[in-house]
Amino acid sequence: MNTEHFERVLLRRQSELRKEMAAFQGEARQSPADVEDPIDEATSSQGKASALQENTLAADALRQVDEALQRISEGTYGHCVDCGREIEPARLKAVPWTPYCLRDQQKHDAENPPTGSLTL
Ligand SMILES: [Zn+2]
């Protein structure tokens, strides 16, 4: 299997996600003590909570990308980590960091429904 294309896609995604996370961490570090108005304060802590949530999603996505790159270097990329079968090419193209074939993805989704993550 030619993984060069996927490696390029994954490396690009990895650097995007790292940038996103650095930006979120910058937002989360802003001190609420700077805000005097109680209404502004509420808005600000809401923004902080959603930034943290997005940061968690980005961290999850980054972990998947890291693991996919790891599989490329081990030569197991493109095979489902559960059943070992080849992952459907269209699925890999749409979600290059997926560790599962469609059938196993559905199994995992049924166990714990995805929260805004991209599934095919
Ligand atoms: Zn599978």
Image (spheres, rainbow, N blue to C red):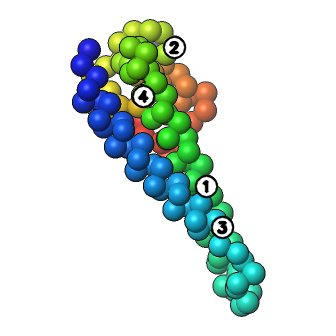
Mark toward the viewer: 3 or 2: 3
Please state the horizontal and vertical placement of residue 115, each as a whole percent of the image: 55, 44
Secondary element at tag 3: helix
Please state the horizontal and vertical placement of residue 92, each as a whole percent of the image: 32, 27
Tell me if I can see residue 59 in this picture. Answer: yes
Amino acid carrying label 4: it is Leu
Q: Are marks 4 and 2 in contact (CB under 8 Å)?
A: no
Amino acid carrying label 1: it is Gln
Residue beneath label 3, please? 29
Mark toward the viewer: 3 or 1: 3
Q: In which quarter of the image is residue 108?
A: top right
Q: Is mark 2 within 8 Å of ligand 1?
A: yes
Q: Distance between the residues labelled 4 and 2?
A: 17 Å
Q: Is mark 4 within 8 Å of ligand 1?
A: no
Q: Residue lying farthest bottom?
A: 37
Q: State the quadrant of the C terminus.
A: top left
Tell me if I can see residue 79 in this picture. Answer: no
